[in-house]
Image (cartoon, rainbow, N blue to C red):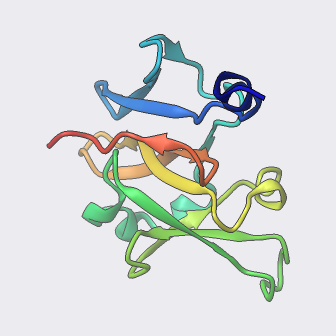
Amino acid sequence: MSAEDSSSSEPERLRVWLERGESGFWLRDAATGEALRWNDGPLRVVKLAGSSYRVDALQDEGFEPGRRLALVPEPENEHDPNAVAVWDAERRVQAGYLPAGIAPKAKVDDQAVSLWEFLDESGRRIGLRILLAPASAWIQEPKT
């Protein structure tokens, strides 16, 4: 088997650019530069659940668009044993949960990034859209 044949049998690594938008980031395929929809292939963009109970926590800089997030399964959760909590990357502050329909499909090593924010009339963050991607994906760190 030639080197060319062996490399073509391996799936190409998903590479995503984060392109700044008005309230967060849009997604681009790093290989082609084409815009990606929020549910292309293995990517999922979901609205954070339960954020209305944690509005003060959402003000933490760890939830700004472009920031990495931690997904923490809660098998002992009395309301939902499939619950997956969403924390800032350092696991200091919890913002909410993955939606109940998505949580059972999430993998422990999935990557999560705060992608888009919802603001109230005073400019306070009241919700997020989160990018979920496989652990093997390359996601560009936003430029500051």
**Where is 84 relative to 36, above or below?**
below
Give the residue at x 60% y 47%. 132
When asked about the image quadrant of residue 75, the answer is bottom right
Question: Percent position (x, y) of residue 110?
Answer: 63, 57
| Relative side of 99 to 123, left or right | right
Question: Percent position (x, y) of residue 20?
Answer: 28, 28
Give the residue at x 25% y 44%. 123
Nearest to the observer: residue 54 or residue 35: 35
| Relative side of 103 to 43, left or right | right
Nearest to the observer: residue 7 or residue 20: 7
Question: Percent position (x, y) of residue 78?
Answer: 83, 85
Total number of numbered discs in the rendering: 0
Give the residue at x 35% y 43%. 120
**Can you name the residue that lies furthest to the left here?**
144
**Can you name the residue that lies furthest to the front here?**
1
When asked about the image quadrant of residue 23, the answer is top left
Question: Percent position (x, y) of residue 14?
Answer: 57, 34
Nearest to the observer: residue 84 or residue 119: 84
Quarter holding the C terminus is top left
